[in-house]
Image (tube, rainbow, N blue to C red):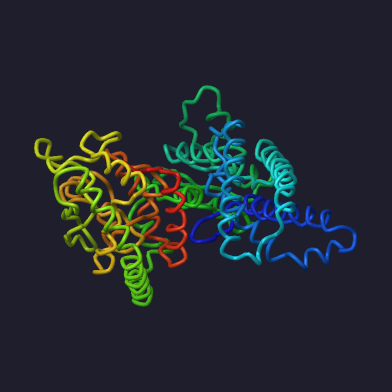
């Protein structure tokens, strides 16, 4: 796996994305070559139009990404994939039309584009069919075994099965002799009992990755056997760390304090904090100025739609658990919690106004938080700021919940784009897993990647209530 923007990406998936971009480039170039005629050679055609073809390629792949066509899920259906592919091509056409109206010199040619769409679709569908075959046959994967016991093994196996394009293929499990499974298999994976001959087992099958996944290590951890594997060149991966790499979250239920202490990450230098603050101050200032006419229009619509103030302010818990007033456009009735007291928002919440429902879907109600960013109470990217009522309760029930307050809360965040809106303690736990991953891997590049994915989330209307 390769680490990009603080995420681990399977090598074969990266090759797939680069290969698809190359095919899109070739499809447009080949069409241009056929239309321009024999007077221009193929290489000359590339030299002549490569910047315009590159523009088409980039916009096409961004459209594919925004339509979630680079996420390979177990639930994907061919009809749904075809619909999203056609939609992506349509979005590409509209986006290119807008670009061409502002930048006429980049027009690749009307007929070239229309005909290249047909060639492009053929190339892309064929390439994706080939990649689906690679995934199904488990080709170009890294062989691995899991050594351990307990629920951590099940957590890892579940995530591997959920991600169709996962880079690892678990050959078998090595567990202790106290198991009571009847068929010697765990969800179809063979189990070897006993830790005495781990090196012989992996050597026999040419396996070079061992994932160590123990819920409890005392008295059963095979130090000598794993050391023998390590010194013979076999890669030993801690189970919690492996889970982090393939999911983009931390399995807080299985992490002990020593893992936090000795793990990489959680770096917060004065320079990185200063750069993050300058970025937030600059971007919030620009956006407040540019969006002020739109925000004024939103305020007028809110006032016409329902009684009450335009802005909604509420105390939230910020960095170092310091309280601050968070500002949003009001999207609920003014008496939303008069009878119930503090409660999480629910799906199809009856307290939300007509205009509020639209604002929440498009995240327009979050725009006044730019003022919180300007003041330095929030960042653009960080954990969601929560109310003290819920924080006090969750700190008692969820391990490491206090650690999310070591950074400023964000208008958007890794948890917000990776997990839908949560309204239960279980949801809060899942959100924390992503928040801690973000805090562990904070960087400017990671922030921009989260902002980019937030745009996709807003356009798809996901995660809001």
Residue 407 visible from this viewpoint: no
Q: Position of residue 197 (x, y in %)?
A: 60, 43
Q: Nearer the viewer, residue 263 or 416?
A: 416
Q: Nearer the viewer, residue 63 or 187?
A: 63
Q: Position of residue 446 (x, y in %)?
A: 45, 62
Q: On the rendered structure, is 297 left or right of 448?
A: left
Q: On the rendered structure, is 122 left or right of 335?
A: right
Q: Position of residue 128 (x, y in %)?
A: 68, 42
Work out which residue is located at the far right of the displayed protein and give it.
38
Would you identify the image quadrant in which residue 339 lies? top left
Q: Position of residue 376 (x, y in %)?
A: 26, 69
Would you identify the image quadrant in which residue 99 lies? bottom right
For the point 27% across and 52% down, which residue is it? Answer: 401
Q: On the rendered structure, is 108 left or right of 190?
A: right
Q: Quadrant of the C terminus?
A: top left
Please, is residue 62 above or below residue 370 in the view?
A: above
Would you identify the image quadrant in which residue 344 lies? top left
Q: Quadrant of the N terminus?
A: bottom right
Q: On the rendered structure, is 150 left or right of 134?
A: left
Work out which residue is located at the far left of the displayed protein and give it.
339
């Amino acid at each position: 796996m390769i680490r990009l923007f603080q995420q681990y990406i399977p090598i074969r998936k990266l090759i797939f994305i680069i290969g698809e971009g190359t095919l899109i480039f070739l499809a447009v170039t080949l069409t241009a070559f056929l239309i321009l005629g024999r007077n221009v050679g193929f290489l000359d055609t590339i030299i002549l139009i490569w910047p315009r073809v590159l523009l088409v390629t980039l916009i096409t792949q961004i459209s594919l990404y925004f339509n979630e066509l680079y996420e390979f899920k177990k639930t994907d259906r061919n009809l749904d994939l075809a619909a999203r592919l056609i939609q992506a091509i349509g979005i590409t056409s509209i986006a290119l039309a807008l670009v061409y109206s502002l930048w006429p010199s980049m027009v690749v040619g009307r007929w070239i584009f229309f005909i290249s769409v047909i060639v492009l679709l053929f190339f892309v569908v064929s390439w994706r069919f080939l990649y689906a075959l690679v995934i199904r046959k488990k080709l170009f994967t890294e062989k691995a075994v899991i050594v351990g016991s307990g629920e951590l093994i099940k957590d890892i196996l579940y995530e591997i099965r959920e991600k169709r394009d996962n880079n690892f293929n678990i050959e078998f499990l090595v567990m202790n002799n106290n198991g009571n499974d009847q068929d010697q298999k765990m969800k179809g994976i063979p189990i070897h009992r006993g830790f005495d001959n781990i090196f012989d087992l992996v050597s026999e099958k040419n396996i070079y990755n061992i994932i160590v996944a123990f819920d409890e290590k005392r008295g059963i951890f095979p130090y000598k056997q794993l050391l023998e594997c390590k010194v013979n060149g076999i890669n030993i991966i801690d189970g919690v760390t492996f889970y982090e790499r393939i999911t983009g979250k931390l399995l807080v239920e299985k992490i002990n304090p020593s893992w936090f202490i000795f793990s990489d990450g959680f770096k917060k230098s004065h320079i990185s904090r200063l750069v993050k603050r300058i970025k937030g101050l600059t971007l919030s200032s620009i956006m407040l100025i540019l969006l002020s006419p739109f925000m004024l229009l939103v305020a007028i619509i809110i006032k016409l739609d329902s009684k009450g103030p335009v802005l909604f302010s509420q105390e939230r818990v910020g960095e170092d658990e310091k309280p601050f007033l968070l500002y949003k456009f009001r999207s609920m009735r003014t008496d939303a919690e008069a009878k119930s007291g503090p409660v999480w928002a629910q799906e199809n919440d009856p307290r939300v106004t007509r205009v509020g429902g639209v604002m929440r879907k498009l995240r327009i109600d979050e725009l006044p938080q730019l003022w919180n960013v300007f003041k330095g109470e929030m960042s653009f990217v960080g954990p969601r700021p929560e109310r003290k009522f819920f924080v006090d309760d969750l700190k008692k029930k969820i391990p490491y919940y206090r650690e999310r307050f070591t950074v400023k809360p964000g208008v958007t965040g890794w948890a917000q784009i990776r997990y839908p809106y949560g309204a239960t303690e279980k949801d809060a736990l899942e959100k924390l897993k992503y928040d801690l991953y973000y805090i562990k891997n904070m960087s400017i590049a990671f922030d921009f990647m989260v902002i980019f994915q937030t745009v996709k989330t807003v356009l798809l209307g996901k995660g809001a209530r």
